Image: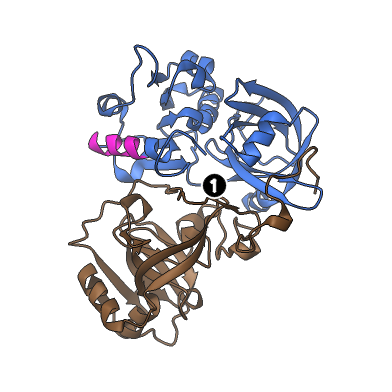
Amino acid sequence: MAITRGFSGRRRQAERDPRLPPGQYDVGKSWPVLTAEPTGRVDAERWTLTIDGLVANPTSWSLKELKALAARKNDGTDTYRGDIHCVTTWSKLDTSFTGISLDTLLEVAQPLPGARFVVEESTTRYRTNLPLDDVTGGKAWVVWEHEGRPLTREHGGPVRMLVPHLYFWKSAKWISKITLLDHDEPGFWEINGYHHRGDPWQEQRFDGD
Amino acid sequence: MATDPTPRRSARPEEDRKLAATWRDAKVVSVDHHGELGVILRLDVPDRVVHRPGQHYVLRLRAEDGYTASRSYSAVSAPSDDLVELYVEKVPDGEVSGFLAEVVEPGDVLECRGPIGRWFAWDGRSPALGIGGGSGVAPLVSMLRHARDVGHPELLHLAVSAWTAEHLPYREELEASGALIAYSRQKGGSRLDAAVIAAVADPGATAFVCGSARFTLAMESHLLSAGQPESSIRIERFGPTGEGDGDG
């Protein structure tokens, strides 16, 4: 590995915010938009979220029903406050999202014993794959608010996935379906050269990392 | 340009994929400044994997204490080019782009990996429409060079925009190609508005749209209004949501 002549780096390692995974920089207040397909157009009134596949109780919810379920739950699991990391090297620190924990939804849908993976699918037909373990145990949400405001369309509104411990392409915008499977099925970026799991702390950016 | 205009189709895609993901030390062969706006780097990449126009490379800068910073840049060169050419727009206060534009000289060595991305990539055989804003023209110029190389310039149509002629990278090459060019902040200028995009939209082509978030959002909306199928639109965005043109 070559040292770059004349490069000392503006953000010194010693002063680096420990919340930043390797190779990431802090975008501060801004929030870049990255989408490879046209921005989803979702009618919040008609939108539903479905959990199907290897579950005992395949279920669909309207946004109203999700909000009611989150309100009934009322145990503080509806909000994430923390950091998000995009594979294109920006991170956004200490930000918040509100919605409903995926655990709450899976309590209703009841995963079958053979379920080991999930595929998230958007209204745009964007897909991304994850091990089931990465979306259970307080690690994943379906969210409709960012910092107390409705999610905007370019950021995946009205409703998106949030899996903040992985690179953000694993958090599908305009989420409409979550399917549980007994096998792994590569999604959009995973087919197109990106890593299958996408752990920012291990810099799993591209195929082969 | 190399003499053989046809990029070889890899006989060993798995190996190439692994090689593309491997960090390699590339030698800077030439550095051409685009005024104060950006810089064109031409790199000699060892074990170069032939890219498809639209794919990108990642450059990584490494300080003596191991600190690194990396950013992605689209390849501008044709697949047949022996060197990899990148256009780096100088981002205000940009740690990486500022260094590449101000410090790097021919002979320097930069860590790189690539080519990466199989979505925003043109096969060079099917009709394509490229729409780019500002430095977003970079991958489209690679497509243009490739279309010329393979003797099928008619497959590719380009519509690009920049604030003024001075802001448009590869202006002369784009002009010579017959690309539709709009200057949005120039006296007597124009924009890629709904009517212009409706005139170039082609449901039979794949539309490659590259630019800031604001630019690409406007273009995809014009394309959809013009009847371009949603499934035929591929987008490469950079920059934050709001104030758009401080790209990447």
- Between residue B174 and residue A43, name the one nearer to us: A43
The residue wearing badge 1 is B117
- Magenta stretch secondary structure, dominant: helix
Residue A144: name its quadrant: bottom left
In the image, residue A205 sits, relative to residue B167, either above or below, namely: below
In the image, residue B80 sits, relative to residue A3, either above or below, namely: above
Asked if the magenta segment contains residue B118, the reply would be no
In the image, residue A57 sits, relative to residue B169, either above or below, namely: below
Asked if the magenta segment contains residue B219, the reply would be yes
Left or right for A41, reference B186 = left
SS for dot 1: loop
Left or right for B243, reference B34 = left
Subunit under mark 1: B
Residue B226: name its quadrant: top left
Residue at (31%, 44%) from the top-left corner? B230
Residue range in magenta is B217-226
Q: Colour of chain A?
A: brown
Image x and y of residue A18, in percent: 64, 63
Residue B1 in view (yes/no): no
Quadrant the N terminus of chain B occupies: top right
Residue at (50%, 22%) from the top-left corner? B167
- Between residue B193 and residue B17, name the one nearer to us: B193
* Crowd band around label 1 with a 10 angstrom C-alpha radius: few (<14), some (14–19), many (20+): many
Image x and y of residue A55, in percent: 35, 82
Q: Colour of chain B?
A: blue
Q: Residue furthest bottom?
A: A113
| Residue type of the residue flagged with mark 1 | Gly
